[in-house]
């Protein structure tokens, strides 16, 4: 297993957001977390990324294992430096005053002391531009001038530039037109297939998420209430009624 989450508890002050969440992701998988607003999906990703308060909830119990080792005491920057995982946050949070190219290059800064950084960075940048040709066309434009879909592509590209083998995405389809949304997920599936990058995606659009992922878990008020293959979840009567409009 690449990632194992055991009975994870996390809270914002006195408000507990996660009540013992457990799930696992194998190397090379695409897994989704689905659930309604307030279910704890974003809190789960922020906890995994080890972000500090107040951006993320404080972990108060359980454990997070990455390749069998606990990362509860690992600093967020260390996860990037070790190329373990990267988060594409909800809202994108790109640097609007920097160009597309500069946004991508700044993500490789933690690896600036590596001897072969330029070669590796160049290869990953080529991958990003091949996945998202729009970014190559707009590489000299400032981030603030991009459309919402292009900014989302840039946010994903920035995560890839860290060289991480595990990418987490928080609501990547939010605010995107259907055509751009499917273009985004097509690129992510290609990335998984070609580079075997493991992907965990949080999505409120359960149908899109289950079409994209091979497995999934359902979060409700800070707890996992169901899990299985995408086909199994799509056929689950409770999941269909609550999240698929069935």
Image (cartoon, helix red, strand yellow):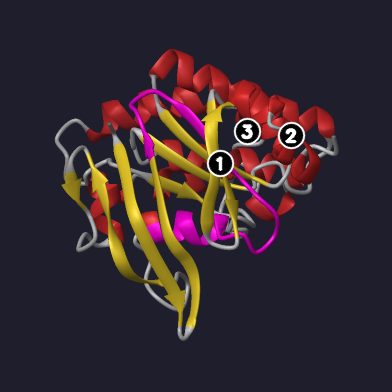
Q: Is residue 221 above or below residue 164?
A: below
Instruction: Name the outermost residue toward the front.
Output: 237
Q: Residue 155: image x %, image y %?
A: 56, 45
Q: Assess whether mark 1 and mark 2 are in contact (beta carbons under 8 angstroms).
A: no
Confirm whether the magenta stretch covers residue 42: yes
**Who's the residue at 24% across and 60% down the image?**
72
Q: Is residue 241 left or right of residue 28?
A: right
Q: Disc 2 to disc 1, how far (Cα)?
A: 11 Å
Does residue 58 belong to the magenta stretch? no
- Residue 237 disc label: 2
Indicate the position of residue 111 as horizontal and vertical percent values: 24, 45
At mark 1, the secondary structure is strand
Spot the residue most to the bottom.
Answer: 14
> Which residue lies under the disc numbered 3?
135
Q: Is residue 205 above or below residue 29?
A: below
**Tally of numbered discs:** 3
Residue underneath mark 1 = 226
Q: Which residues are magenta?
A: 24-47
Kindly indicate whether the residue at mark 3 contacts the one at mark 2 (C-beta within 8 angstroms). no
Where is the C terminus found, in terms of image quarters? Answer: top right
At 29% across and 61% down in the image, what residue appears? Answer: 62
Instruction: Determine crowd level at label 2: few under 14, some 14-19, many 20+ residues with C-alpha closer than 10 A.
Output: few
Disc nearer the start of the sequence (2/1): 1
Instruction: Judge whether residue 178 can be spotted in this image.
Output: yes
**Could you tell me if residue 49 is visible in this image?**
no
**Occupied quadrant, residue 194:** top left
């Amino acid at each position: 297993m690449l990632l194992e989450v055991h009975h994870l508890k996390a809270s914002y002050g006195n408000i507990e957001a996660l009540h013992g969440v457990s799930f696992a992701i194998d190397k090379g998988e695409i897994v989704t977390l689905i659930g309604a607003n307030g279910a704890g999906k974003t809190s789960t990703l922020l906890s995994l990324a080890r972000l500090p308060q107040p951006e993320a909830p404080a972990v108060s119990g359980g454990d997070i294992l990455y390749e069998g080792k606990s990362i509860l005491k690992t600093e967020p920057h260390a996860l990037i430096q070790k190329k373990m995982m990267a988060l594409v946050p909800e809202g994108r949070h790109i640097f609007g005053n920097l160009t597309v190219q500069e946004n991508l290059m700044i993500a490789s800064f933690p690896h600036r002391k590596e001897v072969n950084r330029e070669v590796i960075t160049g290869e990953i940048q080529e991958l990003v531009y091949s996945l998202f040709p729009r970014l190559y066309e707009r590489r000299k434009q400032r981030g603030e001038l991009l459309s919402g879909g292009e900014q989302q592509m840039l946010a994903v590209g920035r995560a890839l530039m860290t060289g991480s083998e595990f990418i987490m995405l928080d609501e990547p389809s939010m605010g995107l037109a259907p055509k751009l949304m499917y273009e985004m997920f097509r690129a992510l599936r290609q990335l998984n297939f070609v580079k075997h990058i493991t992907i965990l995606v949080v999505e409120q659009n359960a149908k899109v998420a289950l079409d994209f992922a091979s497995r999934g878990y359902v979060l409700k008020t800070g707890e996992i209430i169901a899990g299985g293959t995408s086909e199994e979840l799509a056929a689950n009567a409770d999941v269909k009624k609550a999240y698929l409009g069935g």
